[in-house]
Image: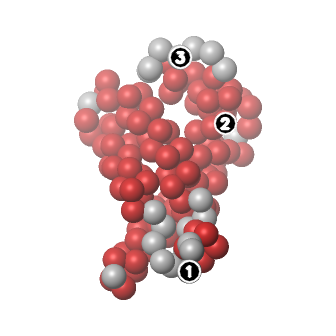
Amino acid sequence: MYNQNLAILILRIGIGFMFILHGWPKFIGGPEKWLSLGEFGMRSIGINFLPTFWGFMAAFSEFFGGIHLILGLFTRFFSTLLFVTMIIATMTHIADGIMEASHAIESSIIFLALIFMGAGKYSLDYNLFQKK
């Protein structure tokens, strides 16, 4: 069990850090960036309303999701947001080929696994919410 919890911690820190880096420019880009991100992403699944909101949600989930993954706080919730974001990214990039969509596909697999695994023992989720 020790090795499993350590592995989840390493996964959370690594992927969390990378998504902070990935999401920060989108998050600070403001409404103009959120609009273009939302239009580009949601168009691929036929959603053409509230593009600024959807772009903000993508930026929010990547940046704050990364922070929460590192902390292991609300891990399943943020993994769900990130999973949905990466599914949309997959749908957006798949038309350009599997290699263009590979980052999003790989990330969605990681987030799906974290939804099922949770944050593990070395997390705020465990220390704050587990029944002793």
**Distance of mark 3 from mark 1, alpha carbons?**
45 Å
The local secondary structure at tag 3 comes to loop
* Quadrant assignment, res 1: bottom left
| Mark 3 vs 1, N-terminal side | 3
Q: Is residue 78 left or right of residue 28?
A: left
Q: Is residue 111 left or right of residue 128?
A: left
Q: Amino acid at mark 1?
A: Lys
Q: Amino acid at mark 3?
A: Ile
Crowding around mark 2 (Cα neighbors within 10 Å: few <14, some 14 to 19, many 20+) is many
What residue is disc 3 on? 47
Q: Residue at x 68, y 29 (%)?
A: 53
Above/below status of 18 relative to 26: below
Q: Is residue 85 visible?
A: yes
Q: Residue at x 41, y 36 (%)?
A: 87
Crowding around mark 1 (Cα neighbors within 10 Å: few <14, some 14 to 19, many 20+) is few
| Mark 1 vs 2, N-terminal side | 2
| Mark 2 vs 3, N-terminal side | 3
What residue is disc 1 on? 132
Q: Is residue 31 left or right of residue 109?
A: right
What residue is disc 2 on? 56
Q: Residue at x 63, y 15 (%)?
A: 49
